[in-house]
Amino acid sequence: MKTVAVMDYGMGNLHSVAKALEKVAEGAKVIVTSKAEEILAADRAVLPGVGAMRDCMAEMKRLGLDQLAKEFAQSKPLLGVCVGMQAMFEFSEENAGVECLGMLPGKVLAFDKSMTDPDSGERLKVPHMGWNRVHFAMEKHPMWQGIDDGAHFYFVHSYYVEPADPELIAGFSTYPHAFTAAVAKDNVFAVQFHPEKSQSAGLQLYANFLNWDGNN
């Protein structure tokens, strides 16, 4: 039986992620855990995240999940979600600057609070919250199987990632300019949106993850 571990450091929407995975599990076992032995024994893992980056990184380090995530991704599929995706990069502007995991080259930037809608001229709200289309930059990546290019996913975020290498970008969205919505490298795939809140497209992404063996 396949096992997927949802990494528990007290800062994510852990149980909604787990329940969404269970819906598409087809016999796979889903566990929510912070125990190193359980995570390392799993076939794949999810690094979720909600909240302030400083607090997220502090808890990951306290529990040793920062090094564990890096070790896990060396040999098995790892999915980052929302702040879990942002944490995979080197540095975040949030909380006056936070050093992150450094698994992927790049940084996390704040949306400009003076952004305006190019059509109406109205001020855009930060955080960016709601449904947005996601367009593929890696059309043939297994994680996009069964999902339409331009499918809607649900976002809630005030920060976005800027990869140092554009080839890491697996998908993008706009608010009002293009920003990175998904990244992929080797055994790592990560998304800014919340699959567990994204109805059928989100469930398909989780189903794809349970069947993905890593790499492209």
Image (cartoon, helix red, strand yellow):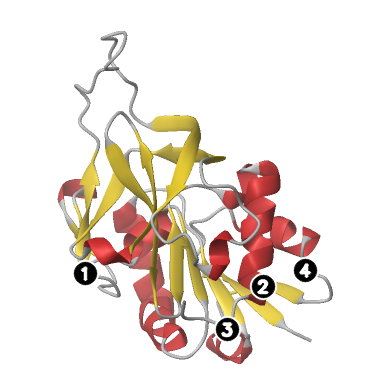
Kindly identify which residue carries mark 1.
Answer: 105
Instruction: Please tell me whether mark 3 sits on a helix, a strand or a loop.
Output: helix
Image location (x, y in percent) of residue 30: 72, 72
Q: Would you name the residue on which mark 2 appears?
A: 210
* Residue under numbered circle 3: 39
Separation of marks 4 and 3 at Cα, in angstroms: 17 Å
Q: Secondary structure at mark 2?
A: helix
Badge 1 vs badge 3, beta-carbon distance below 8 Å: no
Above or below: residue 30 compared with residue 175: below
Local secondary structure at mark 1: loop
N-terminal label among 3 and 2: 3
> Vertically, is 121 above or below 204?
above
Kind of residue indicated by mark 3? Ile
Q: Is the residue under label 2 in contact with that under label 1 (CB below 8 Å)?
A: no
Q: Are marks 2 and 4 in contact (CB under 8 Å)?
A: yes
Q: Which mark is residue 16?
A: none
Q: Could you tell me which residue is drawn at 56 percent across and 69 percent down?
A: 142
- Quarter of the image for the N terminus: give it: bottom right
State the CA–CA distance, disc 1 to disc 4. 32 Å
Quadrant in the picture for residue 97: bottom left
Q: Position of residue 87 (x, y in %)?
A: 34, 63
Residue beneath the point at 35% across and 35% down: 174
Which of the two labelled residues, at mark 2 and mark 4, occupies the earlier sequence position?
A: 4
Q: Nearer the viewer, mark 3 or mark 2?
A: 2
Q: In terms of image quadrants, where is residue 89?
A: bottom left
The mark tally for this picture is: 4
The residue tagged 4 is 25
